[in-house]
């Protein structure tokens, strides 16, 4: 494989960094199809900005039992479809290059469920943590492991006592905590109250695709995300991205269309039926 030259320092500062902050690669997916779809979405966003100078970044949020990142880590210097899997100098990141020169960065992360039934995205960690601990304990564990905690929006999950718990954590500032929107929030759904609170607290709201566990969604990664400027160091992308996210004082620009009314209803019915089986 012949490496495509990386952008030189002259252009690195202007490089568009496109990040999908909520990526699942389910067992029913073909990994190379996920990567092909992500590249296509990232390129489309870069085209809309009028540039071919971009990095596409996928942050995994793997649930209990999922080990796609670990499997890819074990196959370094090998291929997945047309994609070469290359090591970086971090245990929580991989560089992926297709045989036509397309590049992606894949960063490790876990999805946890707290005792309060709140989802938590634990960015940049490879360790498997048990679900079911109180949210405060999970936040402390992620922080201790060097990860970054992000609470993703979900239908009905931020109401009542659970919403009050999230608000308390945002005001507490005991450990770093960010929020995230996703591609499933429909266009007619108003801005969640906790997003407004996050802005008041100078806590950024990120974005990600959050695809569903069905084959028809395996190319949705990269469809929704957020935008940064300035190329990440290709050998330590997770370390640098973490520091940039912690330094944000406002939400980074989001890209990607919000879900339509019919798509939202269809997806909710699908998830309810799946959980009932």
Image (cartoon, rainbow, N blue to C red):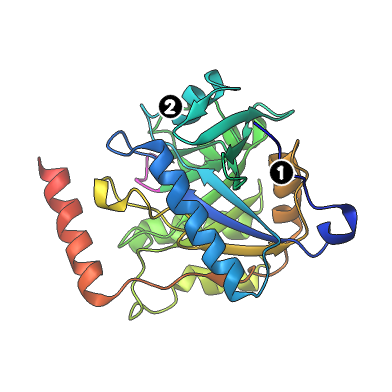
Q: Position of residue 221 (x, y in %)?
A: 44, 52
Query: Is 82 on the left or on the right of 104, as rendered?
Result: left
Residue wearing tag 2: 67
Is residue 113 visible to the viewer in this orientation of the structure? Answer: no
Residue under the image location 36 percent in, 59 percent down: 154
11 w.r.t. 48: above or below: above
- Quarter that holds the N terminus: top right
Name the residue located 36 percent from the left edge and 68 percent from the top edge.
185
SS under mark 1? loop
Q: Quadrant of the C terminus?
A: top left
- Relative placement, left or right, of 267 versus 84 is left
- Which numbered marker is on residue 261? none
**Dominant secondary structure, magenta:** loop
Number of the label disc, if any, that sits on residue 4: 1
Q: Residue furthest top?
A: 74
Whole-angstrom CA distance, mark 1 to mark 2, is: 29 Å
- Picture quadrant of residue 191: bottom left
- Please, what secondary structure does the residue beneath circle 2 have? loop
Q: Position of residue 11 (x, y in %)?
A: 84, 60
Residue in front for this viewpoint, 252 or 136? 252
Classed neighbour count for the residue bearing mark 2: other residues with Cα under 10 Å, few (<14), some (14–19), many (≥20): some
Residue at the farthest right position: 10
Q: Residue at x 63, y 34 (%)?
A: 93
Q: Position of residue 169 (x, y in %)?
A: 56, 54
């Amino acid at each position: 494989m012949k490496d495509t030259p990386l952008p030189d320092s002259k252009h690195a500062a202007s490089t568009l960094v496109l990040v999908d902050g909520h990526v699942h690669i389910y067992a029913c997916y073909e990994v190379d199809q996920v990567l092909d779809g992500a590249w296509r979405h990232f390129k489309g966003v870069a085209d809309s900005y009028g540039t071919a100078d971009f990095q596409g970044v996928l942050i995994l949020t793997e649930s209990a039992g999922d080990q796609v990142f670990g499997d890819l880590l074990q196959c370094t210097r090998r291929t997945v479809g047309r994609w070469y899997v290359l090591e970086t100098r971090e245990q929580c990141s991989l560089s992926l290059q297709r045989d036509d020169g397309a590049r992606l960065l894949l960063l490790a992360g876990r999805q946890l469920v707290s005792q309060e039934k709140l989802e938590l995205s634990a960015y940049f960690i490879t360790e498997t943590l048990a679900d079911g601990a109180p949210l405060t304990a999970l936040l402390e564990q992620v922080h201790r492991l060097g990860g970054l905690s992000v609470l993703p929006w979900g239908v009905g999950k931020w109401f009542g006592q659970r919403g009050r718990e999230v608000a308390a954590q945002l005001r507490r500032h005991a450990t770093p905590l960010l929020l995230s929107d996703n591609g499933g929030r429909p266009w007619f759904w108003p801005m969640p109250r906790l997003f407004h609170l996050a802005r008041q607290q100078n806590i950024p709201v990120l974005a990600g695709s959050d695809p569903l566990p069905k084959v028809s969604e395996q190319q949705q990664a990269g469809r929704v995300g957020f935008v940064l400027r300035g190329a990440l160091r290709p050998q330590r992308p997770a370390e640098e991205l973490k520091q940039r996210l912690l330094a944000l004082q406002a939400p980074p620009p989001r890209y990607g269309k919000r879900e339509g009314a019919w798509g939202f209803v269809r997806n909710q019915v699908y998830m309810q039926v799946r959980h009932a089986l």
